[in-house]
């Protein structure tokens, strides 16, 4: 699979709220960061736990706005709709993926404005 196909596959699984399909795209030792270096999750078990909860949200959806691919790096601009304790909202997100051995090895998120849902 190409890096673009891997990132699209995990986005499709995210939107389907299918944890098994979603985790198939992640390396066992993958890491998630809030850019530049705030660790959000380390390893497949922490990534899984983070998303099992998120996948319970009925409004959950990531809408791809733009994608840039260069080698094994994929950068997505997305609008992510979620249900927060305050209610539904949409968050602007930039996700920068590093693909190694056909798996997501590292992702960095830049969170933008939160828009009322």
Image: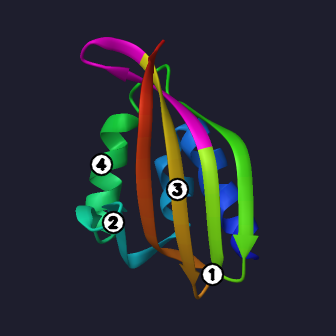
Mark with earlier residue (3, 4): 4
10 above or below 90?
A: below
Mark 4–mark 2 Cα distance, whole angstroms, equals: 19 Å
Which of discs 1 and 3 lies nearer the camera? The answer is 3
Mark with earlier residue (1, 4): 4
Which of discs 4 and 2 lies nearer the camera? The answer is 2
80 above or below 99?
A: above
Mark with earlier residue (2, 1): 2
- Rendered image quadrant of residue 15: top right
Question: What residue is drawn where x is 60% and y is 41%?
Answer: 78
For label 2, the crowd category at 10 Å Cα-Cα, with few meaning under 14, some 14 to 19 and many 20 or more, is few
Decide if residue 64 is on the left or right side of residue 46: right
Question: What residue is drawn where x is 62% and y is 62%?
Answer: 75
For label 1, the crowd category at 10 Å Cα-Cα, with few meaning under 14, some 14 to 19 and many 20 or more, is some
Coloring scheme used: rainbow
8 above or below 37?
A: above
Secondary structure found at label 1: loop
The picture places residue 112, in percent across and down from the top left corner, at 44, 38
Secondary structure found at label 2: loop
Residue bearing mark 3: 95
Decide if residue 95 is on the left or right side of residue 8: left
Mark 1–mark 3 Cα distance, whole angstroms, equals: 17 Å
Q: Which mark is residue 36?
A: 2
Mark 1–mark 4 Cα distance, whole angstroms, equals: 22 Å
Residue bearing mark 4: 50
């Amino acid at each position: 699979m190409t890096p673009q196909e891997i990132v699209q596959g995990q986005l499709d699984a995210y939107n389907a709220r299918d944890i098994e399909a979603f985790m198939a795209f992640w390396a066992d030792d993958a890491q998630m960061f809030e850019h530049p270096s705030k660790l959000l999750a380390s390893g497949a078990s922490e990534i899984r736990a983070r998303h099992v909860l998120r996948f319970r949200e009925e409004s959950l959806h990531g809408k791809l706005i733009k994608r840039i691919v260069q080698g094994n790096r994929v950068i997505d601009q997305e609008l992510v709709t979620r249900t927060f304790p305050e209610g539904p909202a949409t968050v602007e997100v930039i996700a920068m993926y590093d693909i190694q051995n056909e798996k997501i090895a590292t992702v960095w998120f830049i969170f933008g404005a939160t828009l009322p849902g």
